[in-house]
Image: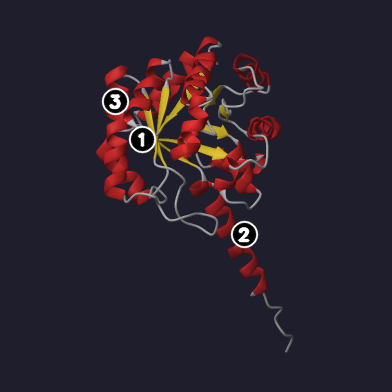
């Protein structure tokens, strides 16, 4: 399916209700997401960490190769999926030629790419050092441009209004407005921002993206958006077309569901004969 055809399909789905994009780190998660009605799947290194029972934030520390994680699990996710899959690629590795990296993902069955991991996770001197080396946000923009040239869908993640505008200008058909790591759960965290402030930040990113191109599809994610109720409120107030579920549709329900199943077996009793 061409990028234009997939985007047109997603736009049609958005007319019937919010789009739900689900980030998954295994074929089993992919199967469940598709059965639940996911509109699009994303496979990236953060998800491979949480499916291993590790905090999502660990994916942003120097203990592994984010692109190797994605490319390793991508075939099993694609094989288990009935919906298109986009691959989260780390643009910041200077040893990776971006066009070749995008091509590898496409050869493994990805219908598109997204800039995850993202440099927006870093602040202060570390962020400044990454940017000064030429390995920061501009490389993420270049990743989006490489995907668009290959006729793939690009989901461009942004952490502020200017980044949202830049992603659209680079050709991203979908823009993700990011509030950081999703709060809650055993391996989660407290939200870095409250819901009201978060919605304001999301609305600014959505407005900037649409000012650059009115028909761009906008998605929201992270922070306090860890339950259907705040997600519904944020969608209504920002006008975004959908929500990207990560931990909320993989880690949290997996841990909860397994725990409930084990408790049920623990409570099983064989009736005594009388």
Name the image quarter holding the N terminus: top right
Of circles 1 and 3, the one toward us is 3
* Circle nearer the N terminus (1, 2): 1
The secondary structure type at the circle numbered 3 is: helix
* Circle nearer the N terminus (3, 2): 3
Asked if residue 51 is positioned above or below residue 98 in the image, the reply reads below
Residue 51: x and y, percent? 63, 47
Of circles 3 and 2, the one toward us is 3
Q: In the rendered view, does 110 fall on the left or right side of 215? A: right
Label 2, on which residue?
258
For mark 3, does the 10 Å Cα neighbourhood hold few (<14), some (14 to 19), or many (20 or more) residues? many
The secondary structure type at the circle numbered 1 is: loop
Q: Residue at x 42, y 44 (%)?
A: 222
Q: In the rendered view, does 30 fall on the left or right side of 163? A: right
Q: CA distance from mark 1 to mark 3?
A: 23 Å
Label 1, on which residue?
17
Name the image quarter holding the C terminus: bottom right
Label 3, on which residue?
208
Residue 123: x and y, percent? 44, 39
Of circles 1 and 2, the one toward us is 2
Q: CA distance from mark 3 to mark 2?
A: 42 Å
């Amino acid at each position: 399916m061409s990028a234009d055809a997939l985007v047109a399909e997603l736009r049609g789905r958005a007319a019937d209700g919010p789009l739900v994009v689900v980030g998954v780190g295994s074929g089993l998660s992919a199967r469940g997401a598709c059965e639940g009605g996911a509109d699009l799947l994303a496979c990236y290194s953060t998800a491979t960490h949480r499916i291993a029972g590790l905090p999502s934030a660990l994916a942003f520390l120097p203990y592994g190769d984010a692109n190797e994680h994605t490319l390793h699990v991508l075939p099993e996710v694609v094989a288990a999926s009935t919906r298109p899959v986009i691959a989260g690629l780390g643009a910041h590795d200077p040893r990776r030629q971006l066009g070749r990296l995008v091509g590898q993902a496409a050869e493994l069955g990805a219908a598109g790419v997204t800039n995850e991991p993202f440099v927006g996770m870093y602040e202060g001197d570390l962020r400044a050092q990454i940017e000064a080396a030429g390995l920061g946000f501009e490389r993420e923009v270049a990743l989006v441009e490489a995907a668009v040239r290959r006729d793939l869908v690009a989901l461009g993640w942004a952490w502020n209004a200017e980044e949202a505008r830049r992603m659209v200008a680079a050709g991203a058909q979908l823009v993700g407005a990011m509030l950081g790591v999703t709060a809650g759960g055993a391996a989660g965290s407290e939200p870095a921002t409250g819901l009201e402030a978060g919605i304001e930040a999301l609305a600014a990113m959505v407005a900037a993206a649409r000012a650059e191109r009115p028909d761009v599809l906008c998605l929201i994610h992270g922070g306090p958006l860890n339950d259907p109720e705040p997600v519904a409120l944020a969608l209504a107030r920002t006008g975004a077309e959908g929500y990207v579920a990560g931990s909320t549709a993989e880690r949290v329900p997996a841990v909860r569901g397994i725990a409930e199943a084990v408790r049920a077996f623990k409570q099983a009793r064989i009736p005594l004969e009388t």
